Structures are given as structure tokens and as C-alpha cells.
Amino acid sequence: MAIYESGEDYLETIYILSAKGGGVHAVDIANELNYSKPSITRAMKILKANGYINVDVDNHIKLTEQGREKAEAIFEKHNIIAKFWILNGVSEKNALKDACRMEHDISGETYDIIKKFVESGKGKA
């Protein structure tokens, strides 16, 4: 099932918050993304219906295997694109901000080239 930009942002945020330890709740995601709790609740219902997350009896949000794989891919793409820009002289602040926008729209071909470039250690930095 295709997932939209906002869904990718939610999955990536759940992944990052989960890595910090403890349970992830809708309010944690709302605080991290600066979205309203009702927006997060609606999005979690959609992600759950599509098999990306589970919510336990204590309302902890956990990624399913499918959700974790998708979140890891999004997180990696974000980091590779940001590193690409940093290697080419863009400030870390702008690189991270731009990578967040680009990660959703970049073609697989372009991403693969950027990833090879970053992994080769080329660039200005």
C-alpha cells in the first residue's frame, strides 16, 4: 500500500522516538511534530488499518515489521540526503530541513546516485 508524505513523517517519528526508549504515545508524536493530538489520533488509525503500527492496551504505539522496515528506509534516506548536502557545503540546519522535504519526492534513481556519492566520501567536507 502506498503511503503519503505525512504518513512517512509519522512512521519516521515513531521510529526515532522508539529508539530513545520507552513507549511512544500519540501525545509524544504530537509534541515532536507540533501537530494537534486529534490529527495524530486520526493518522494512527490509518497507519494501524494499513498494517504499519499496533497500539497496545496501554496505548503504546509500536511499529509492525512492515512499519519498521518502511520507517528505517525513510530514516536512512533522510540521513543520506542531509549528509549529501553537508558534504557539499550546506549548513547542517538547512541540510536537515531540506532533506526532510526531499526524502518524499526524490526518485529512486537520483537517491541511489546520492547514496553512492555519500558512501564514497566525496564532497567538500
Image (tube, grey):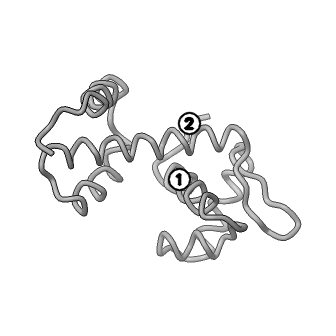
Classify residue 85 as left or right of residue 70: left
Read off the residue under disc 1.
Answer: 12
Q: Secondary structure at mark 1?
A: helix
Q: Amino acid at mark 2?
A: Ala
Classify residue 54 as left or right of residue 17: right
Q: Is residue 113 above or below residue 39?
A: above
Q: Going 51% across and 38% down the picture, which residue do you hit?
A: 73
Per the rendering, the mark at residue 2 is 2
Q: Secondary structure at mark 2?
A: loop
Q: Going 38% across and 46% down the picture, which residue do you hit?
A: 79
Classify residue 73 as left or right of residue 55: left
Classify 10 Å Cα crowding around label 1: few (below 14), some (14-19), many (20 and above).
Answer: many
Q: Position of residue 4 (x, y in %)?
A: 50, 46
Q: Quadrant of the C terminus?
A: top left
Classify 10 Å Cα crowding around label 2: few (below 14), some (14-19), many (20 and above).
Answer: few
Q: Position of residue 77 (x, y in %)?
A: 40, 40
N-terminal-most mark, 2 or 1: 2
Q: Looking at the image, which is closer to me, 122 or 34?
A: 122
Counting the numbered discs, the total is 2
Q: Position of residue 41 (x, y in %)?
A: 67, 68
Q: Is residue 123 above or below residue 58?
A: above
Q: Looking at the image, which is closer to me, 124 or 42?
A: 124
Q: Is residue 89 above or below residue 30?
A: above
Q: Looking at the image, which is closer to me, 31 or 125?
A: 125
Q: Nearer the viewer, mark 2 or mark 1?
A: 1
Q: Amino acid at mark 1?
A: Glu
